[in-house]
Image: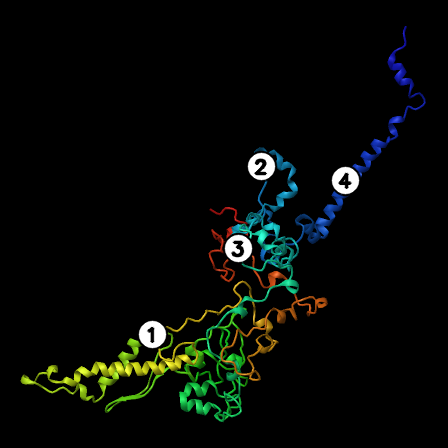
Amino acid sequence: MPRSPSRDVVDRFAGNRGYFHRADPLRRWKNLAALGAAFFVVGWLVVEFAMPGRAANAHTHGELANPHAAFDSDCQACHKQHGLGDFFSNPLSLFKTQDRWHDLTCTKCHAGPTHHTGMKGQASHDRCSNCHHDHNGRNFSLVKMDDSHCVKCHEDLPSAHESGSSSFAKTVTGFEKDHPEFRSLKIDRGLKFSHALHMTPGLVYGENDQHKWTPDSLGQQFGSDARNRFRSDSGNPGDPVQLQCSSCHLLDAGRPADGDGEAKSDFDLRLRVIPGASRHSILPPRADGAHYLPINFDVSCKVCHPIRSPSTASGEVAIKEFTVPHRRQTAALRPLVRGELANRLASGKNPMLALPFGPGKRLDPATNPKLGTFGKELDRLTDASLQAVGVACGKCHYSPAAVKTDVRQLPDKTVWFEHATFNHVSHRSLTCGSCHSGTEASFALNEREPPLIVGVKSCQACHAPTGAGGAGIRHSCVDCHRYHNGDRPLQGLGSPHRDPAQPLNLEQFLNGGKGSP
């Protein structure tokens, strides 16, 4: 009988019948892998219960920033949900799992308007995560961006623009390196004004000027408002008037009330003082104190520089001076002055208007030839009055002595840095003259002052690395500039360009927008 082939197979294990009890290398690795998986699962459960904070960090890649803390346990609040539908619609999406975290839904709450129009790569706004990375802890700032995000375009700005050119600085690689000078320094204010004169004690023009203004003399000349506004801290009405920067440049909040809580004048309603403290304290500022109130003639200047038509006379009729409103051009000013003069001329015992009674005891103007000269006399008085008003306008404006042409409109410079932000309150430890050189009394009188901003070099003295000659204070692009809404950078948070297109109610917000219409 022939030998069975299976016998040959069995004979190979003669004397080694327990071979299956000994693990071969493959089985050994399989056992180790299974044991490791078991230890890993048990260890993970221990961490989940013993250290839930560390477990949550491993699951979510870190805590969300404070504004997003409500979404710590709700990934779908920010991340789009993916499922089988994505695979069937695009099978290649299976191989792009590392890129799915970019699919965010930030625009549910943040409009995120684009940067300046005409820039290349505006599609980058579709992926907020290109610049903003969360899961870095509660105190992490999502808007403190590295300069590299800005430099990638601004190191060669023309090439980043669709037109191939730009009206802004062509190359900027860092604030302390090649930041251009502020554009505001080139603006013509179109106004005659000398800070040095107004900051001199007594407001004198020089050593030979013996007339020093005091609160008393201002009160006698311009009324009680002037006396109350410029009274000295010592309370002595005979002390020379000493203006401070805060006498005219005010933050929006004004000042606290006087000790008795009563305002001494209309001006004091806005400029309250702290009991026992200097009138020139500015506490507290409104909001972040980024900008000062614009200088207003009626608030800051009129008390000492009222525009008045001078006293005059027409025959036996005396016409007292009267105030002329500010901000009126020639076409609007003439009828106002003429009307006031006509009213005052007619209210006096004017022989031109003393008309006799004719037959039937009725007024008969035809019998009084003097009435025909009333209009001519009114024109003469109006021209003379406008001549004096023109001289008053010429003290501050570059215009003819007589008001015959319109006064050039001044540039509206409430905000001097149109494409940047600046917070005055953050710099309160410095004197105003540190950044606005030329505003002190020690400077020579200069009728036509340029904008008194020292420039970018004064900022770089602090905002630059210590190795570059600065004080090491932060100097990132985003400290002063904003990216979104670049064409209108100063619009507030309530602007429709920043607000979400469809606001959420509280429940929708906390659930990441789920269930919203």
Label 3 – label 2 distance at C-alpha = 34 Å
First in sequence: mark 3 or mark 1?
3
- From the viewer's side, name the closer residue of 84 and 424: 424
Query: In terms of sequence position, does the residue under pointer 3 or pointer 4 come before the other?
Result: 4
Residue extending furthest front?
400
Q: Residue at x 62, y 35 (%)?
A: 92
| CB-based contact (under 8 Å), mark 3 and mark 1 | no
Q: Which numbered circle lies on residue 86?
A: 2
Which marked residue is nearer to the observer: mark 1 or mark 2? 1
Q: CA distance from mark 1 to mark 2?
A: 71 Å
Q: Is residue 287 visible?
A: no
Amino acid marked by disc 4: Ala
Q: Nearer the viewer, mark 3 or mark 4?
A: 3
The vertical placement of 44 against 498, above or below, is above
Q: Quadrant of residue 305?
A: bottom left
Report the front residue among 448 and 357.
448
The residue carrying mark 4 is: 37
Q: Which residue is mark 1?
A: 330
